[in-house]
Amino acid sequence: MDEIFKALADPSRRRLLDSLNARNGQRLTELCAGLDMARQSVSKHLAVLERANLVTTVRHGREKLHYLNAVPILAIADRWIRQYERRRVEALADLKRALESPMTGLPAFVYTTYIKTTPERLWTALTDPAFTRRYWGVSFETDWRRGSPMVWEQDGHRIADPEQVVLEAEPYRRLAYTWHTPTEEWARLNGIDEELRATLAAERRSRVSFEIEPMGETVKLTVVHDDFPEGSTMRTMVESGWPHLISDLKTLLETGATLPPVSAGAR
């Protein structure tokens, strides 16, 4: 918690977070140009923000893209703002206003958290049907080989589609697959009306990846859900669903318990 407050105390670092919230997934050169700051200064500030887990990075070819990670902000809200019913926290004021506004720019959704577990257990939690049913309510029928089909199963109902495939599967390190098909049956199971389902079905299929990185006694998990079209409705839904889902996964791995059922947004 101390590193988070230290990172947010500097106005330049708050400007960097505001910039990423306005347009997520920026390169270092873009951040420098947008804030009129020297490259070395921006790099130092980003290093502080990364250590505080307020910024996470994703490699895209030779490029390194930077994303705002709101998880620590939510933790502060849970511990301090809600507990004492404070409406304003000076160090977070600018960031709070930014987080309440709609996200624009690159449509990729990036979420990073740290879980007290091992890469092997986390891999099992992401792939084993008995585990995924506990925190997600779904399971996957697949051999987890690259290019293999995936069948999503929920409450006894199977969602099969030739385009639901495994994209990458490197045990204990990286997993990626295409997102499920918004079928009529899935919509009924999750309380989605036909108009919304049709909107989702008309969009380009997205994909999700999980980066697993051991960090001492914990494991860093980075979820990247991307390849959305501009103005994607599916992106809006998974943006609200993934934080709850990954929090439930983290809780299950660390305590053996689960949170209340996840909403349909991340299914």
Image (cartoon, rainbow, N blue to C red):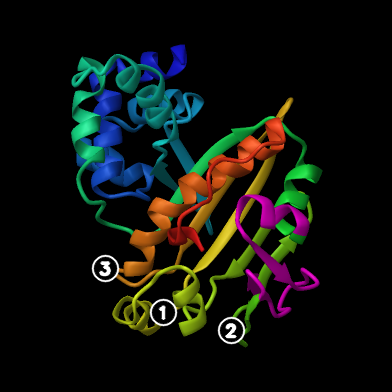
Closer to the chain start, of discs 2 and 3, is 2
Q: Quadrant of residue 9?
A: top left
Q: What residue type is disc 2 on?
A: Glu
Rate crowding at label 1 as few (under 14), some (14 to 19) or many (20 or more) other CA atoms within 10 Å: few
Instruction: Give the distance between the C-alpha atoms of the residues marked 2 and 3, in whole angstroms.
Output: 22 Å
Q: Secondary structure at mark 3?
A: loop
Q: Position of residue 203 (x, y in %)?
A: 37, 79
Closer to the chain start, of discs 1 and 2, is 2
Report the residue at 23% width, 46% height from top.
22
Q: Which mark is residue 231?
A: 3
Give the magenta range: 130-156
Q: Which mark is residue 204?
A: 1
Q: Position of residue 6 (x, y in %)?
A: 38, 13
Kindly identify which residue carries mark 2.
163
Task: Name above or below for residue 94 compared with residue 220.
Answer: above
Task: Name above or below for residue 110 compared with residue 31.
Answer: below
